[in-house]
Amino acid sequence: MTTKLNLPAEQSSDSATAVKAFYDEYYTKPLSFPSNEVDAVVGFFESKDFDRSASIAVSTVLMRQARLDNIKVFELLDTLKGLNNLQLSSIVTEVMNASRDRISTIGFRVDNNINQVEARNIIY
């Protein structure tokens, strides 16, 4: 049983590194997407104030998941279009967590602003 980590793979000076890398990917099919779909999805997330690198990472995961679920990417974008930034971040977090190893999760913090004047009247 191998342990999966989120750390980058160690660089070894082994002469068989290229062969090992080839066989690690042997049974996986490479994914390819039309450039207009990639540009549309990356552009969508950039328009929602995601950084370029985050847009590319999220787009890759969403397009892979859309292909697995047999959903058109543009239909997926139409469903995400009406969401505000907090709702979109929540959905993206769930999809990213579902597609990554179970050793860690992505989350975000929402500040809970409680008005102290109103809070003193509430009995917990």
Image (tube, grey):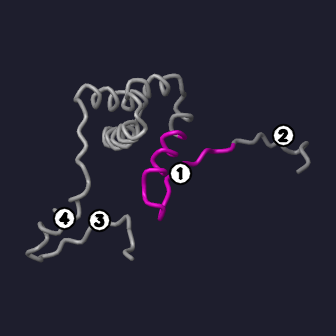
Question: What secondary structure is found at the residue carrying circle 3?
Answer: loop
- Residue positioned 38% across, 69% down in the render: 4
* Of the pair 123 and 85, the residue shown nearer to us: 85
Q: Position of residue 21 (x, y in %)?
A: 18, 64
Label 1 sits on residue: 107
Q: CA distance from mark 2 to mark 3?
A: 49 Å
Label 3 sits on residue: 8
Disc 2 residue type (three-letter): Val
Task: Tell me the crowding category of disc 2: few under 14, some 14 to 19, or many 20 or more residues within 10 angstroms, Cα based.
Answer: few
Q: CA distance from mark 3 to mark 1?
A: 21 Å
Q: Position of residue 111 (x, y in %)?
A: 63, 45
Tag on residue 117? 2
Question: What secondary structure is found at the residue carrying circle 2?
Answer: helix
- Residue positioned 45% across, 22% down in the render: 78
Task: Report the residue that reaches farthest toward the left.
Answer: 15
Q: Which residues are magenta?
A: 90-112
